[in-house]
Image (tube, rainbow, N blue to C red):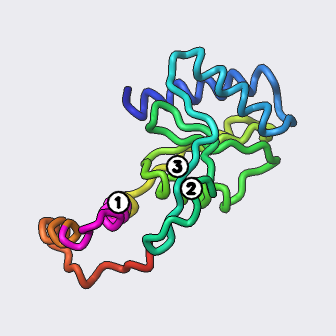
Amino acid sequence: MTPHEISYHIRGAAMEVYNTLGPGLLESVYHKALVLELESKGLKVESEVPVKVYYKGELMEEDALRLDIVVEDQVVLELKSVEMLMPIHFKQLRTYLRLYNKELGWLINFGAYDFSEGLCSVKLGKEDRIYLLLAALLLEKSYKSYLREYLASKIIKFSEIDYHRF
């Protein structure tokens, strides 16, 4: 199933949960209801998925971060129950996508008065995907040879990479 097809089911499930429960409840209530709704559609759903966080190649903590929901191991869902989404919520999801090495996520706000304003997709851009690949390569033991090989094939100079971005 493609991320686009998965997204279709996610939107439908989120709308069903919102229409059934309405706004104003705790995020944890919507979380449980959305997991049940997605599973009833036959989708593989993982809840509270731990993400390893690395800082300069060092593992910080294995359970330092948990993603709300991951659907079909392709799409990350970040749930909120707030009056209005803020720019930091979008930045947070983009960071989660980079750390979990995924390209598509949905920010779902069950607290919005108008649910159409509380359902937003977030995609990483081309530049983000290049850094995802480079970050994955940096975690390999012999990362420099892989990195040089990749960059040579893409005509990017090894010395031009900003390692502080990782």
Q: What amino acid does circle 3 point to? A: Val
Q: Look at the image and say whether residue 152 sits in the magenta stretch.
A: no
Q: What amino acid does circle 1 point to? A: Ala
Residue at 59% across / 15% down in the picture? 40
Mark toward the start of the polypeptide (2 vs 1): 2
Question: Mainly helix, strand or loop, the magenta region?
Answer: helix
What secondary structure is marked by label 2? strand
Numbered tag placed on residue 93 in the rendering = none
Nearer to us of marks 3 and 2 is 2
Nearer to us of marks 2 and 1 is 2
The quarter of the image holding the N terminus is top left
As displayed, is residue 51 above or below residue 143? above
Q: What amino acid does circle 2 point to? A: Glu
Distance from Cα at disc 1 to Cα at disc 3:
21 Å
Mark toward the start of the polypeptide (3 vs 2): 2
What secondary structure is marked by label 1? helix
Q: Are marks 3 and 2 in contact (CB under 8 Å)?
A: no
Q: Residues within 10 Å of mark 2 (few under 14, many from 20)?
A: few
Numbered tag placed on residue 122 in the rendering = 3
Q: Nearer the viewer, residue 109 or 141?
A: 141
Distance from Cα at disc 2 to Cα at disc 1:
17 Å
Measured as percent of width and height from the top left, residue 88 is found at 67, 62
Q: Which residue is mark 1?
A: 136
Q: Residues within 10 Å of mark 3 (few under 14, many from 20)?
A: some
Which region shows up in magenta?
132-145
Residue at 43% across / 27% down in the picture? 5
Measured as percent of width and height from the top left, residue 153 is found at 12, 66
